[in-house]
Image: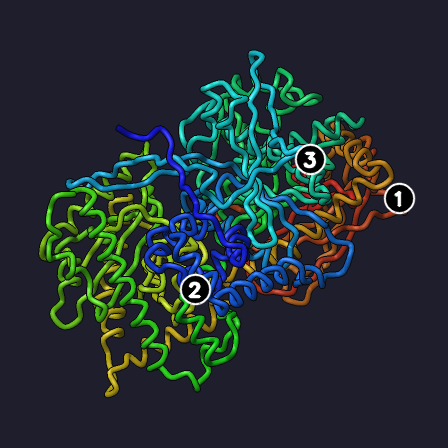
Amino acid sequence: MKAIRRFTVRALIPESLTSLTALAANLRWSWHEPTQRLFDEIAPDVWRESDHDPISGLGLVTPERLAELAADADFVGRADALHADLRRYLEEPRWYQGLPDPKPQTIAYFSPEFGIAAALPQYSGGLGILAGDHLKSASDLGVPLVGVGLLYRSGYFAQSITNDGWQQESYPVQDPDGLPVTVLREPDGTPVTVTLALPDDRSLSARVWIAEVGRVPLLLLDTDIPENVADLRGVTDRLYGGGGEHRLLQELLLGIGGVRAIKQWSELTDHALPQVYHSNEGHAGFLGLERISDLVGNGLSFDEALQLVRGGTVFTTHTPVPAGIDRFDREVITRYFSGDLLPGVAAPDVLALGDETANGGSADVFNLAIMGLRLAQRANGVSRLHGEVSRAMFRGLWPGFDVSDVPITSITNGVHAPSWTDPSLVDLAVDRWGTTDTSRADWSDPSLSDAELWSRKHGMRERLVADVRRRIADGYRTQNPQAVLPSWIDELLDPEVLTIGFARRVPSYKRLTLMLRDPDRLRAILLHPERPVQIVVAGKAHPADDDGKRLIQRLVQFAQDPELRSRIVFLPDYGIGMAKTLYPGCDVWLNNPLRPLEACGTSGMKAALNGALNLSILDGWWNEYADGENGWVIPSADGAADDEERDALEATALYEILEHQLVPRFYEREDDGLPQRWMQMVRHTISTLSEPLSADRMVREYTERMYLPAAAMERELNASDQQRARELAAYKQRVREAWPQLAVAHVESGGVDAVPQVGDVLRLRAYVQLGSLSPEDVTVEVVCGVPGAGGELLDIRTQPLEQQQSPSTSRPEHTLEYAGTLPLDRAGGFGYTVRIVPRHELLLTPAELGLVAVADQ
């Protein structure tokens, strides 16, 4: 018989140990090594068995052990000192507090998943880990974020592998009472709930839980409450579970319910309402509609409210392919927004925001990413290359503009160094330089010997080997409870052997099995008698992705060969706990996606922080940081005839690098037994990448380039009873209505010889028709660059032309004359055109309205 519910009966914590309860309640312990060591000291076996979770771990400690610790004055003193340190961390001014005013007092950060600690399993992969690292670094920097997500009762899923290599999923139910969260309550003690009006006179309610992530509160909405009917209690059952309306309900709750939860949290805790809202991917995009509804209720029109919401909204896109975007049937959207869900927001207005036809999409669907872009004045991709891909992918929303004009910038992701750097490297930095900040330590310092650093890397490899053997043994016991543990498990991997890691989600484009393209060649690499290689692989395929599951099965079956199983291992149930040993324990991190389908790929960043060298396709973050000394670039066969040929060429390149460059360098030893040239690359990697790849750098960029300007725009639009928002809405409406009348009627040029030379000055004169608009409404400019093969301009630059006040006898009727000069300051191909674009001081770029009139002669 199985229990219908499970929970932990906790031992009563002695009064002298109440600091432990406070330390466990704040998730800073997940990246604060001294606090983790204190909990480990309480009961090391319990600490390991609880997957380093002090909440559940404290519930498993015996009353006798707690009494013993309560009587230990030294232990109590250290616990109290760490509690005092936590209070200082939460209260003292940090980087953000030193920035000049005005600056926002609260910034909202919405994400469908957050990967913070194994104790709070609310993530599936890179998007969630990135969101968790964003909150952690915001906390460290003092940035006043409040996070918003959903509390999934079964998280993503637990993965196991059958004997024939097939992935199986299970969904352990998480009891919130056993998680590091507390209920947000009204002054009378009743739980706070938010409610959404649904079609057919139904309603969806959600309880609000809070996880304290250092200084950042994370609000998590949970529908498994008595107020909901049975089917609606399951809305927050699983992360990315179900499809269609189930997914839509999750995203309506995240966006609309999330804003409502913030309003109640703000009132109850006396925090200022956010001035800036950041939507991490389109899943939370409906947040903008809730804010518009509030503003319409306060007297603004929909278009006026839209301007104000856009000004204070930041949108981050993570997908490099249209197939990765959530899209819904327009009829479903119409049904949900034709009722009382959002007063003042009509279904046609909502549908217009998610209409993808301008971008070449279907007229029958509603596109969440496109709505996110239309609701946010500031948008970004997550690496420099992904920014380029995103501008090309969404360029149809700004017709007539060049790809470089598309208003999507990029901020390259980063990883939270204290969370992902191995404690042995932190200890080394403390011993050598007196700092726990490994991202700012001088790893090139000659006083740090290669032998010391090599010894730390060897220790990390040893811990990985031990962890792999333990995990495989635990899995074997689970599947074969009556069997004797086979001896070969104790022979898995070797801490002396070059170790390559590969761990990530398993969609087809990440090409888990590219390494198996030539199995015999891989076998020879793994089993080389003098220079062996071992590979540790982990990853989950989406439950509905049978193609991904087949990739896992193929790799698992390859690794089951008795001759190979000591050199290649697949670890089931990849997650934060496993990753913290895997990244440091690897010498090389492998990444071979189809370029340019990797938006960023932060796993290689975490490995680099621990002195691993990257072996990767030039995609995502690696495209901008590979320098030839921090790893190896796998050449991309972009000119291949088809995917089959491309895979063959890139797999061959992978083998060539391993056989002739990477493996020999690892095993080239000096008289002292050290791989000197390899260690030079390791030092260079940690020294040059630790700070640029840190989430602190990323959050500072978001703050300076996105949050502060968005807050300034929000203040401007709100000024004088939101008069500026009304003015901007009126301007946009007037310009859109008049734009069909605009034209560049004629362009004249002169001032250069028959053969132009560098240093010549081109004189331009343009005659334009503005219809009902005034010259103050627009900018007339010359656009110049290098002509491409199809005549399009590349590497463009713009320069405004000046309106000429004196009449010209050659001016056509009903036109205005603009003129200017253009110096020819570089040799080679040259081309130009003249265009008219909207101009208003509250437009972020001339492309914002997607309106342009270009000369046709």
**Residue at 60%, 50% in the rendered image:** 216
Which amino acid lies under the numbered mark 2 shown in the image of this protein? Arg
10 Å crowding of disc 3: few (<14), some (14-19), many (20+): few
Q: CA distance from mark 2 to mark 3?
A: 37 Å
Give the vertical position of 469 relative to 403 (above or below).
below
10 Å crowding of disc 1: few (<14), some (14-19), many (20+): few
**Mark 3 touching mark 1, by CB under 8 A?**
no
**Upstream in the sequence, badge 1 or badge 2?**
2
Q: Toward which corner of the image does residue 142 lie, by quadrant?
A: bottom right
Circle number at residue 354: none
Q: Position of residue 61 (x, y in %)?
A: 39, 52
Q: Can residue 835 be seen?
A: no
Closer to us: 491 or 248? 491
10 Å crowding of disc 2: few (<14), some (14-19), many (20+): few
Q: Which residue is mark 3?
A: 187
**Mark 2 touching mark 3, by CB under 8 A?**
no
Q: Which residue is mark 2?
A: 37
**Upstream in the sequence, badge 3 or badge 1?**
3
Q: Can residue 531 be seen?
A: yes
Q: Position of residue 595 (x, y in %)?
A: 38, 50
**Upstream in the sequence, badge 2 or badge 3?**
2
Closer to us: 748 or 321? 321
Farthest-out residue, top: 200
Q: Secondary structure at mark 2?
A: helix
Which amino acid lies under the numbered mark 3 shown in the image of this protein? Pro
Q: Position of residue 515 (x, y in %)?
A: 23, 54
Q: Which residue is mark 1?
A: 807
Q: CA distance from mark 3 to mark 1?
A: 73 Å
Q: Position of residue 594 (x, y in %)?
A: 35, 48
Q: Toward which corner of the image does residue 739 lie, by quadrant?
A: top right
Q: Secondary structure at mark 1?
A: loop
